[in-house]
Structure formats: C-alpha cells, structure tokens
Image (spheres, helix red, strand yellow):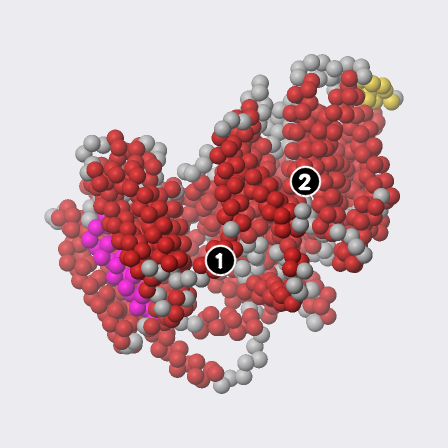
Amino acid sequence: MSQSENWVQQLPQNIIIGLEQGSVYSLIALGYTLVYGVLQLINFAHSEVFMAGGFGSYLVVNGIVGHRHMTGVMVPLTVLCGVLSGALTGAAIAWLLEKVAYKTLRRSGAPKLAFLISAIGASLFLSNLAGKLFNRLPNNAFPTYFDINHQLFKIGNAKVTLIEVIIVGSAVVMMIFLDRLVNRTKLGRGIRAVAEDAPTAALMGIDIDKTISRTFVIGGALAGAAGFMFGTAFGVSNLMGFTPGVKAFAAAVLGGIGNIRGAMIGGLILGQAEVLIAALPFVGAQWNDVISFVVLVLILLVRPTGILGERLGRAA
Amino acid sequence: MNTATRATLRRLAACLLGGFVLALMVGRQEGSLNDFGISFHQAVVGPRIFVFLLIGLVIFVMVTFWPRVVPYLTRPGVAPLGAGLLAVLAAQTVMNWYDPLVSSTGNGKFSGVRTAANASPNLSSVSVAFFGWLAWTLVIAALVACAAAIVTRVRVFGYVTAAIGIVGAVLAYVAHSAVVDLDGGIDHSLGVYADIVGFLLLACAGITAVHARAEVADTRGFLRKVMGYRPGLPIAALGVILGLLAFSTAGWFGALQINDTLAQAHSDFDGTGISSLALNYLGWLGWTLFGAAAVLSLAATYLRNRMLAWVSLILSVVGVVLTFLTLRSMTDIGAQVAPQFGGTWKNLGAGGFLACIVFSLFAAATAMVISSTSAGVRRNVRAKAPTDELPVTSMVKGFRRSSNAMPLLIIGGALALFYPPTLTLTWQNVLVGQIGVFVLLAVGLNVVVGWAGLLDLGYIAFYEIGSYTTAYLVGALPVKPPSWLQMSPLVSIPFAILACLIAGVLLGAPTLRLRGDYLAIVTLGFGEIIQILAVNNPGGFTGGPQGPTVPHPRIHLGGINITWGQDNLPYWYLLLIMLIVVIVLFYRLEGSRLGRAWAAIREDEVAAQASGVNTTRVKLLAFAIGASTSALAGSFFATQVGYFDPSLFTLQASILIVAYVVFGGMGSLQGAIAGAAVLTWLPQFLKAQVPQDDRQMWIGALVLAMMIFRPAGLLPAKRRKAELEGLDAAASSETAAVPRAGAM
C-alpha cells in the first residue's frame, strides 16, 4: 500500500522527468516524420545524425569553454552555442547523408528496401567512424561547464533542475519554430506539397530534389540540437544514437508517421509512459524498453495509423 | 557557369570529400580523454591529407575521362585483362601466400613473405627479387604492353604481354615453392595460385587483343561457344588439371607438421599396418583410378557417348568412396602412432579432398553428357505442349530442364562436402557458427521480406525462441520440463519449430493488418520485448543474462551411434543436410500457388485480394514459414555452441539479417544465400586486413557502396531484375527521343 502511495507522491517529479525525456524523443522523432512525409521512407541513419550533433557540439563547446565553469548570463550563451553547433553538425551530416545514401538511389529507381539498407550501411559507417575518431567508451561525460543539476524552483515537492528547463524550453521553442516553418513559409508549403503528392508538386514548379534535401537538413538540425541536449544531460558516445533513435522512431509511429504534430505528441506520450509505468511498484526500470513497445503496439491495435493519423500534408 | 562545368565542379568536390573521408577511415585509432579530437587532427593535418586528396583527384580524373576510354572497352582482350588484373591485385594484396608465416610473424601475405624473403640468405636471388620488386614491375609492364596492344593492335605488343604473363606465372610458382621448400610447414595458402591464374589471364589478354577476329571478340559468346562445343568437356579438363596437382604435388597427410605428397605418404605408411586398400590406393590405385576416370570422362564428353558416360560416372563415384576410405584409414593410423597431433580426420592435407573434388568434377562432366543427350529427346516432345504457364513457372522448369543445373549442383555439392575439411579450425568454426547459421536465417527471412514483402525487423526473436525451446526441452533451463517431455537436442527441433509457428501466428494475427512500416516497428518491438524478457528472467524461466548450457546432440538409433562433440566438421554436415532440405523446399515453394500469391500481395495487396487471394492467410503463412526456419537455425545453434546467452539476440542482429537478404538481392533464394554468406564471411576476412575495431565501419561503407552502385543486390531475383531493367529501358527510350539539355 505504501508503495503505491509512493508512486502518487513521486508523480509530479516523474512527470517532469518524463517531459524531459519526451522532449528529446520528440525532437528526434520530428526528423523521422519529416523524411517519412516527403519520401515515405524510414531514415535509419537518423540516430547517427543525432549522435553527430552530440559530438559536434561537444567539440565546439569544449573548444570555446574548455574546463572553465560558467555562471549567470554565460549559461544561456553556452547553451545557445551548443544548440547552434549541434544543429549545424546535424544539418551538415543529414545533408551529406541525403546526397550519398538517398539521392543516388532515388536516381537509379531502386526498390524501397534498398534505401533502408543503404541507410543501415551509412548508420554502421557513421557510428563506427565516430568510434574510431573519438573513442568507443559507452559514455563520455560532457565537460561540466555549468551545474546541470542546479535546482531552479519547486512545483509542490517536485524539483526542477536547470537541465530540465533547458531541454524542455529549447524543445518547445524549436517545435514552435518548426510548426511555423512548415505551415507559414514557402519552403514549408513545398514540403507539404511534396508529402501530399510529389509528381503533382513537381508539375506545380516545386524542385523536388531541393525540397527533399532541405527536409533532411531541417530534420538533421533538430536531431543535432537534441544530440547536444542529450549529451549535456547523459554524456556522448558513438552508440548514443541507437536507443533514443529506436524510441523516437516508435514515437513517430505512435503519433502517426509523417505527421509533425503527431511526432511531438508521440514523443511526449512515450516519455511519460516510460517514466510513469516504470515507476509502478510491480514493474521496475529494467522493463523500460518493453513498456514503450507495449504501449506502441496497444495504440496501433486501436488506431492502426497512429494517434493523429498520417500525412504531413493534411494534418499539419 | 553552364551546367556541364557545374557538374564537373560538383564531381570534383565529391571526389575530394571522398579522399578526405578515406583519410579519416585509415587514420589513427581513437582520441584520448585529454584531447578528444586528436585522431581527427592527426588524420587530416599534415602532409598525409594531400596523399588522400590526390587519391580523390585521381578518381575524379578517371571518372571524368571515362567516356574517352569507353570505346576501347568493347575491344577484344579487355575482359581477360580486367579479370587478370583483378586476380593479380587480389593475390598480391589481400590473399595469403604462405600459411606458416601467419602464425609466426602475423602476416603471410605477399608483403609479409617479402620481409621474410629478405631476411633469409639461402633463398635464390630470383625469388627475393620476385617478392621484392619484380612482381609489381611485371604487372605494370604487362598492363602497359596490353593496353598498347589493345589500342594499336600491333602484334609485337601482344606477344610481349603474353611473354611477361607467362614469365610472371612461372616466377610466382618458382618463388613460392622456393619459400615453402626453405621453411617447410603446412601451406594452405591460395595466393600463389590466384597470382598464376592472373598472370596467365594477362598473357591470354595480350594474345586475344592482337589475334581476335570478329567471331571470338565477344567474350561471353566465345565462352558460350567453348562451353557448348562439347558439354562437360571443359569441366573434365579442369578435373584433369586439378587431379594432376592433387596426385603429384598437393599434401595428403600432415602429421608431424610435414606435408606428405601421395608418394611420400605411401612410403610413410608402408608397414604401419594400414589397410591394404589404403596402401594400394596410395601406391598405384589412386593414380590408376584418376587416370581411368580422366580418360573415360574426356572420351565420354568428347564423343558424347552415353555408355562411356555411365561407366565414367560409376568410376568417379567409386573414386570418391575409395578416396574417403583411404583418408579415413590414414588418419586412424595417424591417431594411433602420434596421438599428440590429433585424432580421426585430423592433419589431412588438401590433397585427398582435392582428389574427391576432382572425381566429383568428372561425375559432373559425365552427368552433363547424360542429361544433354536425353534432354534433346525430351525437349522435342515438350515443344508441342501448349505453353500457357506463368513466366515464373516456366522459368523454374526451364532451370530444371537446362543441362547446366545438374553439373552445377554436383560441383557445388562436391565443394560443400570436400572443401570444409581442408579449412583451418578457425574457418571451420566461422563456416558453421556464422556463415551456415546465418544463411539458414537469411533464407527464412527471404520468405517474409523478399517474397511476401513484409518488413520484419524482429526476426531474431524467432531464432531466440527456437534456441530457448530447445534449451528448455533438453532440461538446460532453470525450469525443467516434465520428465516425459525431456528429450535430446535433435528430437526437440520439431517442437522448437512448433513453438515458433505458434509465436509467429500470435504475433502475426493481430498485426498483419498493419501496413508496411507500421508492421516494421511492431515486429521490431516484438524482437526487443522477447530479448528483454530473456534477460530480465521473469519467474526464473530463462536463467537471465547467463544463459543456458545445452548438451551436444547424439543419435542412438538401432545400430547407428553418432555423437557430436567439440569438433566443427560433423556439425557442418548436419547443417548441410538442413540447408539442403530447406533450400529445396523453398525452391519448390517459390513457383507454387503460395509463392505466386506472395508475389501478388507484395506487388499490390488490393489487386491480389480482388483476384481472390486470401491475404491474411497468405501473410500469416509467410510469417509462420519464416519463423519455423528461424527456429530450425536457433535449435541447431543452441546445441552446436553448447552455451549461449541473450545478448546475442539484439535488434542489430535482426537488422543485419534484413541487410543480408537485401544485399544479396531481395526475393531471390540464391541472393539471400550469397548475401548472408558474403556478409558473414567479410568480417572474418577483414580481420586480417584492417584493425579489428574498424571492421564494422568498412562493412558499413561496403554495404552503402553496394546499394549505391547495385541497388538490386548481388544476385537480383529474375522478376525484380526484369522490373528494374524494364523501367530503365522505358526511361532510356523516352530520354533518347529528347535532345540532351546541353545540346539545345
């Protein structure tokens, strides 16, 4: 009895942790969903873009800050620098990835699964190249240039730390930015048009190749920024992309793959579900990965195309 | 800047970037915690980066000027030149030249032998020179001369090329045997033979380049002509050449770590109480059998005489059996006399097994004669029958009818039976534990992914269920089965298959209504769930991360007692039987009603449903059949390794099996086999070529390159190939009608 009371007591704290995890999942899931929207393909190398963002921002932040300790106004500046460098690295890697592993295959009219395998090849290559260049340790702690666990304020008895605010805050900013981008700009209209019906979009004067390339860049930038945040909170490694990548993929499917708002919601739900269910007294943290997939399967059984349904064009 | 310049600049940028990435790939290992990016700096800063950029530049120049070279590519002599160069390059860079060096200095390759040759004063100067500088000089000289011959068609150049090629081949043989004579030891290496073949091909290229007339200029047509002249004759001739090698120079027995040729083995075994049959075989019977089979099969193939062919076939089979009995009694004696060097079937050289392959080649050649003479009769009858069959069915039947199938199968069978015993222990282990098992898995997954078009990313779960079912039934898990259910590993296979069938249906029934990518993520989740279940060990069923210890299989049936132990070879034959059964079944399945239904739902599910295909049932069957193959593999694996743990059954493994299937050529049985074999062999092969930790990176790069340059896979399915080429043909006929952008 006391255990379930415990669960209720920890609920606010766990919701905050779930929000933190869910934000990272959402940011990665957006990349999957964007690419799926325009190409109807799962980009299996997306988790490596996330990883590249982590390493890129690590190198840049470490190069600028070194081992100094940041306080006050320098903290948001450092974070901004990290987010930007992560996003840049992620965008660059995603752009290259599209050029090498996707565009060439698209030109030769390859079967759909060939894209999957070329992406898997690229993923193997990237993660092991990173392992070769940096190291193959499972966890490289980020330089502690500010106190990430600094307690900012309390909601009830739940503590809110600095890193949680940073992650959730920047995720929200980026999601709003993306939503505007897709719904209000010319590029966004292009992306939606290609997702809706690529041949017709081409007839309407949209350069499909460029649109697809830019979609990859946008998704890559989001994943790269998420890589920085994940790295700050949990450390970077050459295999850091795998598990969050799979979870984010599940989140994208959960929300309805190809659907931008679906990916955001899917990521948040998955993050919450994992933390809250694993905290149940009879479950435990070792079932973390099982939970996300059971939730996914259950929801797919009820709604076979995800919570919000597919189609980037229609629902976003 | 016009389009062409921009395209050229873009290509230049891509090539330079490629050079840059290559510099990273062969750079130093890992940074340190103090300087995280140190290996990055060292890889790209300093003069070495210019070398790699130069490589990129060379590739750029080659790609850019490729159209200038293309007109010469159809000239006679180019194909053998390419093949010869490839063989020589492979031989002198990646293949092993002298096995004993592999263990002592770690490098038995061409460069390793060079170092060793320089260090040994007793070696003749020709051999030292060959390993030092002569070999590569010869290759370059032959290349230059042959290119000159191809371009100018001046006869002298062709003769020069031929002379260089022959000199190279002879020198390679002489230098290699000098090294082997000097240091002794058992030599399994194939580098020198590939080198000889390569040099001879270069010689052929020179001659072809200057002498070819129109009728033989087309290499493929020429080959067809040679092979079709007398069916089986080339195979019989190959058998004669290999046989001469096997009976004169190849090693037969290697106790005391010395390779005995046939004659030496005869004098060694004389008076050791070896069976008279084996002694006679070593003395005169082997040569006589070989000679008789060679003459008979050559005569049979040349004269196309069925009678002679049958006699030769029977003689060849007798030859295989007698060779086997001889080998057996040799190792029996060897085990008695020198037990410290191992027991039965140990220490045999390549010679005996090569002899078996030779006899099988003769059998294949004569079988070709038999089938070609009888197929002619049958084809006349068949031609009158109405052909309203579907393309696939007639294709399958066509393969069965064609006279090439039988000899190919016999040669393949001979290799599968007699090649593995000559491998080193490590490679036998790889063959059984990696290549064989994963071929079985890939063949099973090919049904689901390739034929039915359902992307299954959790396939390894069925493998796991199969392994654990066997472990449970033999009583290796913490939870014991009731005593009446406890059984030996081989008997548990049907139950493992049953368990996987049930699991497949349980997973499939609710999820198969999901479309493509949703199915992928659900199967992925299923795989993860099963693995975590095994690790987390609810109810103490699986034994957790430690995993179970499964006994090796045994058969006690009437008078037959077979026990499998630590040795890999018996498992290989067990696995071979499984593989053959599965492949034959699936081969029959592809053209069947069910196979066609799979193809239909893969191409268009709605149309298939409208045509009366029960899509749910057919998909479920695909899932169940794939799952049961996986169970077979899992069950075999569990009892072969003896000990396993759940960390083997990761999501990465599932994804890799999908990669094997697609890499080989989706939907083609040969493709799945080839893909799995190549991609499981590759890491072992790369072990000797690149740093251990970099293997995955190179494999990733290779898979990526393969998909870019050959998206249909290694051996594409005929149906898919037709689809792809059909599209290409349609596109090119359309674009051909429109002038190119630059021309306007």
Callout 2, which amino acid?
Ala
Whether residue A242 appears in magenta in the rendering, the answer is no
Whether residue B235 appears in magenta in the rendering, the answer is yes
Q: Secondary structure beneath disc 2?
A: helix
> Label 1 marks which chain's residue?
B
Say which mark, if any, is on residue B285: none
Kindly tell me whether residue B568 is visible in this rendering. no
Task: Name the side, left or right, on which B289 lies relative to A27.
Answer: left
Answer above or below: position of A116 versus A149: below
Return the residue nearer the eye: B87 or B109: B87
Main SS, magenta region, reads: helix
Segment colored magenta: B231-254
Count neighbours of disc 2 (C-alpha within 10 A) and say few if under 14, some if 14 to 19, many if 20 or more: many
Say which mark, if any, is on residue A94: 2
Return the residue nearer the eye: A217 or B425: A217
Return the residue nearer the eye: A6 or B658: B658
Across and down, in percent, residue B268 comes to 15, 46
Answer above or below: position of B37 versus B490: above
> Label 2 marks which chain's residue?
A
Answer above or below: position of A232 versus A117: above
Task: Name the side, left or right, on which A9 lies relative to B232.
Answer: right
Residue pictured at 32% horizontal, 32% vertical: B105
Residue pictured at 59% horizontal, 23% vertical: B36
Q: Which residue is mark 1?
A: B70
Q: Secondary structure beneath disc 1?
A: helix
Callout 1, which amino acid?
Val
Q: Are marks 2 and 1 on the same chain?
A: no
Q: Nearer the viewer, mark 2 or mark 1?
A: 1
Across and down, in percent, residue B514 comes to 73, 55
Residue pictured at 30% horizontal, 33% vertical: B115
Across and down, in percent, residue B351 comes to 25, 51
Answer above or below: position of B266 versus B131: below
